[in-house]
Image (cartoon, rainbow, N blue to C red):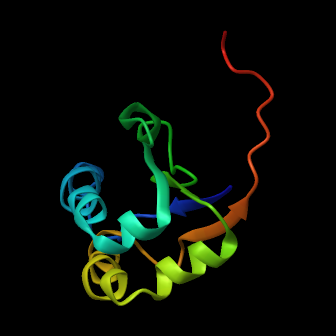
């Protein structure tokens, strides 16, 4: 299993509130309801930068998405799937500054599980 981490910058004209609302609602619904998601994604988590962090100055990212796949091939297949390209990809442009958003593939190594 691999995990894709997406470090997201919001579009510069979007407020933090509008960004978080769009990502939590509209985009999350597109992810949940898309056939490509059911074919390839094993887990999807959004991590939103806490609002109080913006008062401290510019944040490194507005949030991260963690997306689990069985393999790099499945990740590639998802991002090339016609259902993703038709429904999800156009929405990413509505809330994320894709020129500043960073994607990287990882293998998770758990160090502590909290128990």
Q: Image point 50% across, 44% down: which residue?
A: 57
Q: What residue is rendered at 45% in x and 47% in y?
A: 45
Residue furthest to the front: 39
Residue at image location 37% in from the left, 64% down from the top: 38
Q: Residue at x 45, y 53 (%)?
A: 62
Examine the rendered structure and indicate whether residue 101 appears above or below residue 60. Answer: below
Residue 108: x and y in percent read 74, 46
Q: Could you tell me residue 106's position as x and y percent?
A: 73, 58
How far across and how far down the image is residue 10, in percent? 38, 64
Image position of 16 with respect to 54: above or below = below
Q: Residue 35, located in which quarter of the rendered image?
A: bottom left
Relative to 95, say whether 29 is above or below.
above
Q: Say which of 96 and 4 sits in front.
A: 4
State left or right for residue 99 relative to residue 32: right
Q: Nearer the viewer, residue 15 or 42?
A: 42
Vertical placement of residue 97 versus 111, above or below? below
Residue 56, position as x, y percentages in the image: 50, 37
Q: How many marks?
A: 0
Which quadrant of the figure has residue 115?
top right
Relative to the observer, which residue lies in front, 23 or 44?
A: 44
What is the quadrant of the N terminus in the image?
A: bottom right
Q: Is residue 35 left or right of residue 76?
A: left
């Amino acid at each position: 299993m691999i995990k894709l981490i997406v470090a997201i910058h919001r579009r510069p004209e979007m407020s933090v509130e509008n960004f978080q609302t769009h990502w939590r609602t509209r985009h999350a619904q597109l992810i949940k309801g898309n056939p490509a998601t059911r074919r390839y994604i094993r887990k999807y988590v959004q991590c939103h930068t806490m609002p109080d962090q913006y008062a401290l100055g510019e944040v490194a990212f507005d949030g991260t998405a963690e997306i689990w796949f069985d393999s790099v091939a499945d990740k590639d297949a998802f991002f090339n799937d016609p259902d993703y390209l038709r429904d999800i990809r156009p929405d990413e442009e509505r809330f994320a500054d894709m020129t500043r958003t960073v994607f990287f593939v990882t293998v998770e190594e758990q160090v502590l599980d909290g128990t």
